[in-house]
Amino acid sequence: MSKLKYALYTGCTARESTPELLSSTLAVAEKLGIELVLLDEASCCGASHLQDFDEFLSLVLNARNICYAEKLGLPMVTICNTCQLNTVMTKERLDHDPELKARVNEKLAEVGLEYKGTSTVRHFLYALIDDYGLENISEKVVKPLSHFNIAPFYGCHNIRPSHIHYKHNMPQPDYEVSEGGGEVAYEEEGLMYKYTHENPYVPTSLERLIEALEGKSVEYESKNKCCGFHVDLQAPKTSNALTGTALSDAIDHGADVVVTPCPLCQLNMDLKQESAGKQLGREIEIPVLHMPQMVALALGCTPEQIGLKFNVTKATELYA
Amino acid sequence: MSDTTKNTAHETRKVTIKAFRFNAETDYLPYYKTYEMEVGKDELILDLLNRIKWEHDGSFSYRRSCRHGICGACGIKVNGKPVLSCKQNAQELVNLFGDELVFEPQSQKRAIKDMIIDKGDFWEKHAAVKPYVVADVDPHPESETLMSPEQVENFLDADYCIQCGSCHYACPVLDVNEDYIGPAAFAAAYRFSVDPRDEASTERLEITAELGSGVWDCVKCFECAEACPKDVNPIEKITKLHNMQFEQHVAERNVATKHAEGFVRSIKKYGYLDEQDIVLYSEGLGVVKHLSEALKMIKARKVHPFDFKKEKMPRSKNLKEIQKLIEISKTNEL
């Protein structure tokens, strides 16, 4: 296998309140021999909130982020579901609307940049599974997760809306992708095609990853539901109800730990257990890991890299 | 295309259907009944509903009418996925979910009989947004009201909505907040507010701007976009309604609007979102209610409350570019 190399768009959370996400991602890449080039020029993706306030500005800023991956000639990977969705939503809009692309490029030209559409944008989860390969990951496992019942929690923005995600998250064609993101490669297909890579009603990628790390995945209904993060400020009752229900569901189905590829889900589910529990009238206590933290555990990365000390709900005993 | 998608389309498939059964007049609890049948390649979910009723149990109840994907009566959930029965091929779902299909009503808590639900809440919410053109119409106009292709395109297909309820009953917010207006009604609010003949746009924007019931309570889960059998993409219209609140100066300064606008404030300073500042700025004095979580974050060293100089706050490289782009690209103010 030739060495995999990506431009890593970290988003804000990995550089602020969840440093453990960034350190574990870099550790996993190092162990697997994947080269990640940090996009230090990138800005916030707007987290779906800037979009509500100023849609055009959000398109310009997200296009700028992609420009820097294009300048490196690298595919972009993300480690946050919301970054992934906002980036590919921008890409979809610009690659399909030449007039809008021209308007955005007019602004980008003022700072000497041009959005072309030549870099693909995928979540690191799928780069690991589809590019590196589950079998290859399995071979690198030094601390099998066989003593854990792990509840996968997918997070909305990497599985819905499927009509956008399937084009970006599925393995990319190995032939040259032309300007515009190789749109020719994806002709309109039926429901089945859209759902072949990841079916949002029955997602499997995290289970397959857990299995490759020799862990036992927990089957529960809430795995593809919303955690409520995006209304945490204005509607905490809604957010607590959704977080609490998902966590309770995982606990009641025998989970020892929850794992998610989205740092916003992780932060919400890790931090809000007490208030969600209060609202639901029950005890909720379960460690919630970032997807790369789980992989890093199995690959035998150092505690410093895995960063369990930054998890709010006590998770350090998972080292044992 | 992978092997799993190459189905044996010419053949029938043996399918086990588990159907939700409940009669609000006689049953205390719902139960599931199992039916086995050979399903042909052209059969729709509606055909299977008919076969349960005609071949197995005449008391089985469901709504159906047009059979052409336009009346919106026959929406149910199959293995949790909202479908329009008359539009959804059955074998396609067998390929997706395996040979056991679970038929359930759109909302179990609103079930009246089997697949039939009380859709009263849906219609109530729908009516609340004035889903019609509000205008003084001259009954004898001298010429027709023309609409340009651009004006029609601006509907963004919101006019394709058939009020089937698929998105409404897929929305997790409505499950926990009964005041919430919901994705279908928001799509309708958008559709009529951008109609060039309409005069109630401001009123609709005010209705949908209310905290607790309006668009700010959307959790952005995209369940509605996934559920819609007509590709209306309701959340796209929810975003548009957010934008229109600012464009038409309907937005009031509150925790939700400040949260959205606060992103610009942060990105301008650092390129990144200042996660501490956004909470302080959006909440104002209300920030005290986050005290317990803040302490937890401080304890886990996730935030740095005494970093007054913001030395721990990351800054994007080439920040000046970002600042310039904000200056020349921003379109809205709060």
Image (spheres, coloured by chain):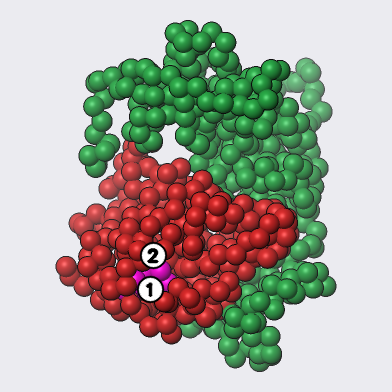
Chain colours: A red, B green
Q: Nearer the viewer, residue B205 or A312?
A: A312
**Mark seen at residue A147:** 2
Asked if badge 2 and badge 1 are on a common chain, one would say yes
Crowding at dot 1, Cα within 10 Å, few <14 / some 14-19 / many 20+, comes out as many
Along the horizontal axis of the image, is A42 left or right of B4? right
- Residue that label 1 marks: A297
- The residue tagged with tag 1: helix, strand or loop? helix
Which quarter of the figure has residue B132?
A: top right
Q: x, y (%) of residue B216?
A: 70, 53
Q: Is residue A19 above or below residue A211?
A: below
Q: Which residues are magenta?
A: A293-299
How far is disc 2 from disc 1 in space, using C-alphas? 12 Å
Q: x, y (%) of residue B174?
A: 68, 42
Which comes sooner in the sequence, label 2 or label 1?
Answer: 2
**Quadrant of the frame with the N terminus of chain A:** bottom left
Q: Is residue A179 above or below residue A311?
A: above
Secondary structure mostly seen in magenta is helix
Query: Chain letter of disc 1?
Result: A
The stretch drawn in magenta includes residue A189: no
Q: x, y (%) of residue A63?
A: 46, 65
Q: x, y (%) of residue B123?
A: 72, 29
Query: Residue shown at 82%/28% (left/top)?
Result: B136
Amino acid type of disc 2? His
Crowding at dot 2, Cα within 10 Å, few <14 / some 14-19 / many 20+, comes out as few
